[in-house]
Structures are given as structure tokens and as C-alpha cells.
Image (cartoon, grey):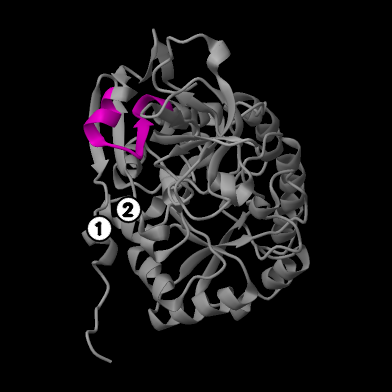
């Protein structure tokens, strides 16, 4: 469920008119629905309530501090993948025992910071990383908890750039490597191996890939038990898909019904890492039409948002529904097939292709499904300023990120007058 609906001719977020937000804060503008993402978090929490899981929201999906704080205050943990995300977790006072840390490329500095903060566990992606953490833990004279990330070599049936569980990807370790680590765990005296971790990809709409991965991971858990290593956690990662176009993703309830029978006998704390599922449909990108360009070959709706603001269409050929903030009074017959394109100097700079829209220059559009992997992947390409972000809760709204200025663009640069 998400709370972006038309009331009469106007599109609303909860009880706030989006057109009024566009006029107040300018465009491009990200707007998030509090009710939507909190409801999604509580749904997955309720669906798995029989096993009292730790739900670690995936910070990379959307890392705005206000949104993180709301989720942590509701009981969420955080799944982080960088020192910067750890910094954000500290900033909102996320309890360290609710933080898990993935990433194939953790630096020594990042590992040290996480050890000092006392996070729940590192999700270790390679033997080399395991050795590095063991060495650093020894220097701090600490025992550090780690989970071993298993690559089950399965297809998640999603875009190849967000598939993370095939043997040709950089993520996790093969079964034989993990078995060798378990056998030789005495070589890592400063580590406690406390769990098995899997994360098979993103925007996965069927339970089958999760089921296959979990069954393979359970074989490793059984192997650890036989070798006298009794684990505490089973982290099944994230990846639950949402509706962007015509997908029919599983609900939290249907997903839990298929997963719980597989894990209930393990007597391990279950960890989940949802990101897109919680935040994806909780946000929209509002943009204004600058020009409408008619050519003999194509009609272009040129907007003030581009691939620098929302790169998913350019990067993944991702589909986002695009709606006017105000329905036209003109007959639908005046609507034309158009490409919705941005101002960036790239042919890949589009947010939608072949869309039928009844709009004029100066109208506002909403790009739906822009709550996850949208602002968090934004850039300053073409020296464009990043948008503002606004949070809506019922009939109130809050500015949770200021729009960047030109001065922000050059703030860290050093201009040498003479060389």
C-alpha cells in the first residue's frame, strides 16, 4: 500500500497536495510518505513475528538521516556497507547491536571504526577480508563477531547488475571456502563465527530463488553444527521486489509463509535486510516541464530532472510510472506518445519512453517508485545541484534535506590562480 492518490484533479501524498509542495520548494523535489514506509516496515515485522527477527533496513536504498531515525525508533536495525553509512548510523544513535556490515571492500579504517562502535557482526565476503578483520581485532585485543557470506550460485531472475548470488559475481564465498574456514576456524583466534549470511540480489518478485538459496545455506549450517560450531544468526538478506509497472511481487505475508517453515527448526536468530520493499514506493520525484519539443520522429517532454537525479532508467532500463500532478481539463484525445527526457547531455538521460501524457509546458510531473535507489544514487553530473527532500506525515510536511546551491558544488574545490 502506498499513499499517493488523486483527490479530484490533484495528486496528493497522504493529505498534502504535491503541486503545492512543488510551488513551495521548487523542482526537482523528492517527496516521501511517512505512512507508506512505516507501514511497509511494520508489515514485514508482523509477517515474521513468530520468530522475532532483527530487521536491518538497507541504508543504501535511501540514507536520509530523518528516514533512518524514524525506522530505528520503530525498532529497525541497519544494514550498512560503508564507513559513511556507519557515520550516519552513529549520528542517529542506532544501537550498535542492531547493525550488520556488508561490502566486499571494507577498508582498514572502516573495519576499525566498526569494531570500536561494537556492531553486531561483519558480513564477511572473502578469506582475505576474514584475515584482515582477525588481524585488526587482535591489535584491539577484542573478539569480533562475524557472519560468513555464502554465494549459493543461483539465479535471482532480476537485472544482471543487481544479481549478487551467481558464482561469477564479486559477492560472498563458495560453499567449499566456507567449509574450509569452519574447519580451520582456530586460525582466526580473534573472531567469533556467529552466522551465515546470504543476499541474492534486488527487486526479486518470486520466492523460489530465496527458497533455493536458503536450502543451500542450511546445508552449511548443518555442516557447522557437525563440526562443533554452533551459530547464533541466519541472515537471509533482502531483495524483496515491489511494483514499478506490471510486476506481481510477493507480499510480506506470502513471503513469510514460504520462508518460515524453512528456518523455524534452526534455532537461530533470523536477520532480514529489506530496503526497496520498505522505501521504494514511499517516494516520488517531482519535476517541471521546461519544453515540449515536437520533431517529425518523436515528441519530447523535456523536464528539469534528469539522470543525475534519478539514474535507474539509464542504468537498468528501469520503468517508473509518470503522472501529472494535475489532471488536464482537455480531452484525453489531445494526449500524445512522448519520451520524458532530462536536461543532461546524454542520450541515456530519460525517465520514461513512449508515454501517453496530456500535458503542457510548465506542468508538473511525478515520477513514482522513487523512494529507493533514487536520491541515494544521485550525482552532480553536468554540475547540477541535488534536489531537496521533503517528508509528508498526514497533513504536515517537513524539509529533510535542503536543495544544493552552486556554492555547494564547488565548496571542496581549491582554485589555483597560477601553476
Few, some or many residues within 10 Å of mark 2 (<14, 14–19, 20+): many
SS label for mark 1? helix
Give the answer, above or below, for where 57 lies relative to 326: below
Could you say where residue 316 lies in the image, as x and y percent from the top left? 62, 48
Q: Where does label 1 land, which residue?
A: 406
Asked whether, in this view, residue 41 is left or right of residue 397, the answer is: right
Asked whether, in this view, residue 94 is left or right of residue 355, the answer is: left
Residue 23 highlighted magenta (yes or no):
yes
**In which image quadrant can residue 371 be found?**
top left
Could you say where residue 279 lies in the image, as x and y percent from the top left? 46, 36
Could you say where residue 126 lies in the image, as x and y percent from the top left? 63, 71
- Determine if residue 271 is in view: no
Q: How far apart are marks 1 and 2 (CA)?
A: 7 Å
Residue at 70% x, 44% y is 158
Q: Nearer the viewer, residue 250 or 337?
A: 337
Looking at marks 1 and 2 on the same chain, the residue that comes earlier in the sequence is marked by 2
Residues in magenta, as a range: 20-36
Give the answer, above or below, for where 112 lies relative to 53: below
Q: Nearer the viewer, residue 399 or 277?
A: 399
Give the answer, above or below, for where 327 lies relative to 157: above
Q: Could you tell me how many numbered marks the image carries?
A: 2
Kindly check if marks 1 and 2 are in contact, taking CB atoms under 8 A apart as contact. Answer: yes
Q: Nearer the viewer, residue 167 or 297?
A: 297
SS label for mark 2? loop
Could you say where residue 409 lies in the image, as x and y percent from the top left? 29, 62
Amino acid at each position: 500500500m502506498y499513499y499517493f492518490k488523486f483527490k479530484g484533479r490533484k495528486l496528493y501524498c497522504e493529505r498534502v497536495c504535491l503541486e503545492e509542495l512543488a510551488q513551495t520548494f521548487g523542482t526537482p523535489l523528492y517527496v516521501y510518505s511517512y505512512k507508506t514506509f512505516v507501514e511497509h516496515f511494520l508489515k514485514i515485522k508482523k509477517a515474521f513475528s513468530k520468530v522475532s527477527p532483527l530487521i536491518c533496513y538497507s541504508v543504501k536504498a535511501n540514507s536520509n538521516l530523518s528516514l533512518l531515525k524514524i525506522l530505528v525508533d520503530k525498532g529497525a536495525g541497519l544494514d550498512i556497507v560503508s564507513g559513511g553509512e556507519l557515520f550516519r548510523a552513529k549520528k542517529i544513535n542506532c544501537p550498535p547491536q542492531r547493525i550488520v556490515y556488508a561490502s566486499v571492500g571494507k577498508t582498514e579504517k572502516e573495519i576499525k571504526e566498526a569494531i570500536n562502535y561494537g556492531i553486531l557482526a561483519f558480513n564477511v565476503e572473502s578469506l582475505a577480508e576474514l584475515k584482515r578483520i582477525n588481524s585488526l581485532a587482535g591489535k584491539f585485543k577484542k573478539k569480533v563477531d562475524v557472519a560468513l557470506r555464502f554465494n549459493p550460485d543461483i539465479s535471482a531472475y532480476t537485472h544482471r547488475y543487481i544479481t549478487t548470488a551467481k558464482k561469477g559475481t564479486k559477492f560472498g564465498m563458495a560453499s567449499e571456502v566456507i567449509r574450509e574456514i569452519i574447519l580451520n576456524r582456530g586460525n582466526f583466534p580473534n573472531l567469533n563465527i556467529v552466522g551465515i549470511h546470504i543476499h541474492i540480489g534486488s527487486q526479486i518478485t518470486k520466492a523460489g530463488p530465496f527458497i533455493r538459496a536458503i536450502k543451500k545455506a542450511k546445508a552449511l549450517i548443518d555442516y557447522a553444527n557437525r563440526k562443533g560450531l554452533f551459530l547464533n544468526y541466519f541472515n537471509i538478506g533482502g531483495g524483496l521486489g515491489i511494483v514499478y509497472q506490471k510486476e506481481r511481487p510477493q507480499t510480506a505475508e506470502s513471503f513469510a509463509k514460504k520462508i518460515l517453515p524453512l528456518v523455524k527448526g534452526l534455532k537461530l536468530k533470523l536477520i532480514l535486510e529489506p530496503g526497496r520493499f520498505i522505501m521504494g514506493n514511499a517516494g516520488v520525484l517531482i519535476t517541471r516541464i521546461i519544453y515540449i519539443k515536437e520533431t517529425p520522429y518523436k515528441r519530447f517532454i523535456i523536464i528539469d530532472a534528469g539522470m543525475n537525479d534519478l539514474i535507474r532508467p539509464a542504468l537498468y532500463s528501469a520503468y517508473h510510472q509518470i503522472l501529472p500532478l494535475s489532471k488536464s481539463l482537455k480531452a484525453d484525445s489531445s494526449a500524445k506518445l512522448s519520451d520524458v527526457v532530462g536536461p543532461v547531455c546524454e542520450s541515456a538521460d530519460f525517465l520514461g519512453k513512449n508515454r501517453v501524457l496530456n500535458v503542457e509546458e510548465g506542468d508538473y510531473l511525478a515520477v513514482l517508485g522513487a523512494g529507493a535507489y533514487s536520491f541515494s544514487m544521485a550525482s552532480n553530473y553536468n554540475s547540477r545541484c541535488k534536489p531537496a527532500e521533503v517528508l509528508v506525515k498526514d497533513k504536515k510536511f517537513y524539509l529533510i534535506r535542503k536543495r544544493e546551491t552552486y556554492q555547494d558544488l564547488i565548496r571542496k574545490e581549491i582554485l589555483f590562480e597560477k601553476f
